[in-house]
Image (cartoon, rainbow, N blue to C red):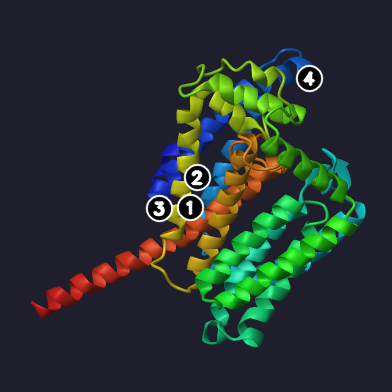
Amino acid sequence: MLTWILHRLRGDKIIWITVFLISAVSALAIYSSTSALAYRLKGGDTEAFVLRHLVLLGAGFLIMFVVHLIDYRVYARVVNVMLAITIPLLIYTIAQGSEINESARWITVFGQSFQPSDLAKLTLMIFLAKLLTQRQDVIRDFTEGFLPALFWVVIICGLIAPADLSTAAIMFFASVMVMFIAGIDLKYIGMLMMVAVMGLSILFSTAKRSGTWESRIGEYKERIVNVNYDGSPQTVQAHIAIAKGGLWGNGPGKSTQRNFLPQAYSDYVFAIIIEEYGLIGGGFVMLLYLVLLMRAVSIVTVSKTFGALLAAGLAFLLVLQALVNMGVAVGLLPITGLTLPLISMGGTSILFSSITLGIILSVSRDALEQKQKKKRGRQKDKFQFA
């Protein structure tokens, strides 16, 4: 079965290799970071959580493989249906979302916790890529090119922001980058940033979670200006883990802060990676995500095609989330609650990350096939001429 799959892998091989390496890092990190959780919930069975995680990673690879064989243009045809499902789910989440980790981001579907924002990420990037591709002739026009994109970015990010500001912010910035690549006038993008600032001002004065946001930003500011300020418990423990790791780390499985760091296997797994593998290991993980971004953006020669915009948008989403998570772990950013894609423990996160990567690889597969066809065509013409 494995050999059959390996012989049928299509698309950018560097992306495949990068994803395999990230998953290998994930397995090691989850095995180490869940030991304390295993003693608390599984009677000391330290393999229980990593085996579950490996099953999820395996399922993720299977999903990625299937999705990468599907023509990515299919998503342009079904995105209106996706939009019709996503918007009501986001509204329902605001009205009925359960409190998990002090955040009303989740709803329960068939007994499984689910974040509609994960579906919204895919929907927004597909719809935006389709919209901007269709309007290339009027892309620099305010009414015909900019306003339709602005409307959907504001609607979807606005529905997510009250419960999950950090995810909404990442989606917003990824959308801005896609709009820039598509050719939207810079002055309109500047206008979009102003709309975002006004929206933030309204949210901070009306949203239920505004107190939490202000507390996190206040803690972050105090930590920056006051060297004697310890900060929140998770921030302190994460910094201790990073300090213990130093340049080379303490070695695989030798983390001690996993016993004290809240969410060591999800939000702060990067701190455990640095403790065990050092700044060298942390830098390697960051490099993997950057390679993923570069390869995804370079799949198609700079163009305004649907595939190019879709691959770029989805890659920006994944890598921005990874960079923000790492920034929080090392203290460069305030606490957000975002996980590290494909590395942090979590079922739906791995599922949607796998779908996202599968779509990127589908675009890559098509681009390589088109390139090979053109090459064969040139060789045939050369032979006929000779």
Query: Of helix, strand and loop, which one carries label 2?
Result: helix
Q: Residue 228, image x and y in percent?
A: 71, 27
Q: Earlier in the sequence, mark 4 or mark 3?
A: 3
Tell me the quarter of the image containing the C terminus.
Answer: bottom left
Question: Which disc number belongs to residue 83?
Answer: none
- Determine the CA span between mark 4 and mark 3: 41 Å
Q: Is residue 274 left or right of residue 266?
A: left
Q: Quadrant of residue 18?
A: top left
Residue marked by disc 1: 293
Q: Which residue occupies the foreground of this view, 130 or 260?
A: 260
Mark in front: 2 vs 4: 2
How crowded is the residue under tag 3: few (<14 C-alpha within 10 Å), some, or many (20+)? some
Q: Are marks 3 and 2 in contact (CB under 8 Å)?
A: no
- Determine the CA span between mark 1 and mark 4: 37 Å
How crowded is the residue under tag 2: few (<14 C-alpha within 10 Å), some, or many (20+)? many
Q: Residue 111, image x and y in percent?
A: 84, 42
- The amino acid on which the numbered mark 1 sits, given as a three-letter code, is Leu
Q: Quadrant of residue 201?
A: bottom right
Question: Which disc number belongs to residue 12?
Answer: 3
Q: Are marks 4 and 3 in contact (CB under 8 Å)?
A: no
